Image (cartoon, grey):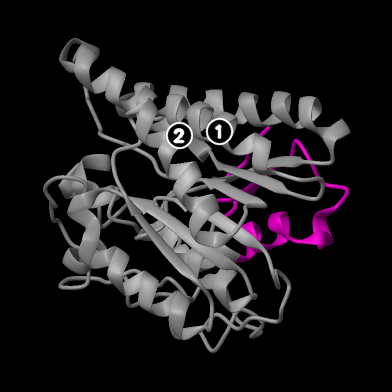
Amino acid sequence: MTDQYTFQDPSKLYADKVPDEQYLGGAGTDAEMAENVPADHGEDTYRGSDRLKGRKALITGGDSGIGAAVAIAYAREGADVAISYLPEEEEDAKRIVGLIEAAGRTAVALPGDITDAAFCRKLVADAVEGLGGLDVLVNNAGKQQHVEDLADLTDEEFDATFKTNVYAMFWITKAALPHLAPGSSIINTTSIQGYSPSPMLVHYASTKAAINNWSKGLAGQLAPKGIRVNAVAPGPIWTPLQPAGGQPSDALPEVGSETPLGRWGQPAELAPAYVFLASGESSYVLGETLNVNGGMPTP
């Protein structure tokens, strides 16, 4: 893949990136994945064209996976970028900060746990201070753990999943709103799971359906203020979330085969959707869920 503008056969892309059975402890990191089958975040391919020049963006989960790809793309499109991440993901975060700065933009690294309401409010305050303002918010950080049987789904796991995926979005968005002027954009990461839930991901899928609904409802509420709210719904994307318990280890080689393209997606393939929704090119787009899922049907 030369860059995102190259004419190419999407069914043949990333044929060399088929993971084997593996498991990553904790939240998982891109640094660990790189030892096996590294994900593509567009580090060597994304080409910017000033589509976000002068913008100031906060991206949760910006150290790895989809968030990292979006951070790289935003920086190369001219935006200053703040990323939030768990302290255990510092190695990944440092790499993304380096790539943002290599693009000539300001990078702000904000480690912490977004399941804590106080941290979420501080996160926004620190991002605004470090960037000198805020006009793009990407609620992307997520928690996904497969649980085969509802009897094995603990209260703690259910609570942590909703706090990471839904509560944090509420806390962060509410704290960000006073700083968002007309023309600003909020982009939330939902999932194909919000439409077509896997039996082993009922709690995770429920959060993604909530995010989809939240995005559409909030879009109507904020439209008169000139703030656009949209969502992106990825399909199976090769990120640390997957081998860190998001999928059974023995299923990893086959995940993605259910899509019409028959393969995993890569974070780099998501970034242009987030750029479009943050840019003025999407000025008449709000309450939309952009599905980037390899062709899986959605309502």
Q: What residue is at 43 percent from the left and 43 percent from the top?
A: 123
Q: Amino acid at mark 1?
A: Ala
Give the residue furthest to the bottom: 2
Q: Are marks 2 and 1 in contact (CB under 8 Å)?
A: yes
For marks 2 and 1, give the CA distance.
6 Å
Name the element at disc 1.
Answer: helix
**Does residue 280 show up magenta in the picture?**
yes
- Residue 54 seen from this side: yes
Q: Is residue 9 above or below residue 125?
A: below
| Residue at image coords 31%, 73% | 95
- Relative to 10, residue 173 above or below: above
Q: Residue at x 70, y 44 (%)?
A: 180
Looking at the picture, how far across and down is residue 93, in whole percent? Answer: 31, 64
Residue 174 drawn in magenta:
no
Q: How dense is the environment of label 1, judged by Cα within 10 Å: few (below 14), some, or many (20 and up)?
A: some
Which of the 4 image quarters holds residue 116? top left
Q: Residue at x 20, y 68 (%)?
A: 31
199 vs 9: above or below: above
Decide which of 192, 117 is in the foreground and name it. 117
The stretch in magenta equals 272-299
**Whole-percent x and y of residue 91?**
21, 66
Q: Position of residue 35 (x, y in %)?
A: 15, 73
Q: Which residue is mark 2?
A: 121
Left or right: 218 with respect to 203? right
